[in-house]
Amino acid sequence: MKAVNIHAAKTHLSRLVDEAAAGADIVIAKAGKPLVRLVPVTGRDRRRGFGAMKGRIRMSASFDAPLPASIARAFGVKK
C-alpha cells in the first residue's frame, strides 16, 4: 500500500491514477489519517443493443389509436 498526503496527491495525480489503474493500492491521507483509496473502475458498461428489452415491455393494442378530441385540443392539435 502506498500512502500519500493530499498535497502530494494534487501534485502527482496523473501518476497516481496511472499506478492505481495498473493495480497499485494508493491511499490518500490528510494529517496522517487515511481518507480515500484510489481504485480502478472495474468492468466497462455494456452497451445495450437493439432488442435488449424484447419481451419486457408491453404496449396496448390501442397505443397508436387517435386521441380523443378533448385531449387533442389540449395539445393544440387541429383537424
Image (spheres, rainbow, N blue to C red):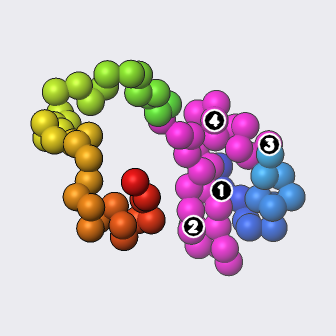
In this view, 29 is above or below 31? above
Q: Tell me the magenta residue range.
A: 15-43
The answer to whether one can see residue 43 in this image is: no
Badge 2 vs badge 1, beta-carbon distance below 8 Å: yes
Q: Name the residue under label 4.
A: 21
Q: How far apart are marks 3 and 4 (CA)?
A: 10 Å
Residue type indicated by callout 3:
Arg
Q: Mark 2 points at which residue?
A: 34
Residue type indicated by callout 4:
Ala
- Label 2: state its secondary structure: strand
Q: Distance between the residues labelled 4 and 2?
A: 19 Å
On the picture, is 6 further left or further right than 62?
A: right
Residue at 73 percent across and 46 percent down: it is 16
- Tag 4 or tag 1, which sits nearer the N-term? 1
Q: Which of marks 4 and 2 is in front?
A: 4
Residue at 65 percent across and 61 percent down: it is 28
Residue type indicated by callout 2:
Pro
Residue type indicated by callout 1:
Ala
Residue 9 is situated, as x and y percent measured from the top left of the image, at 76, 59
In this view, 78 is above or below 26? below
Q: Nearer the viewer, mark 1 or mark 3?
A: 3
Q: Nearer the viewer, mark 1 or mark 4?
A: 4
Q: Distance between the residues labelled 3 and 2?
A: 19 Å
- Label 4: state its secondary structure: helix
Name the one closer to the observer, 58 or 21. Answer: 58
Q: Quadrant of residue 4?
A: bottom right
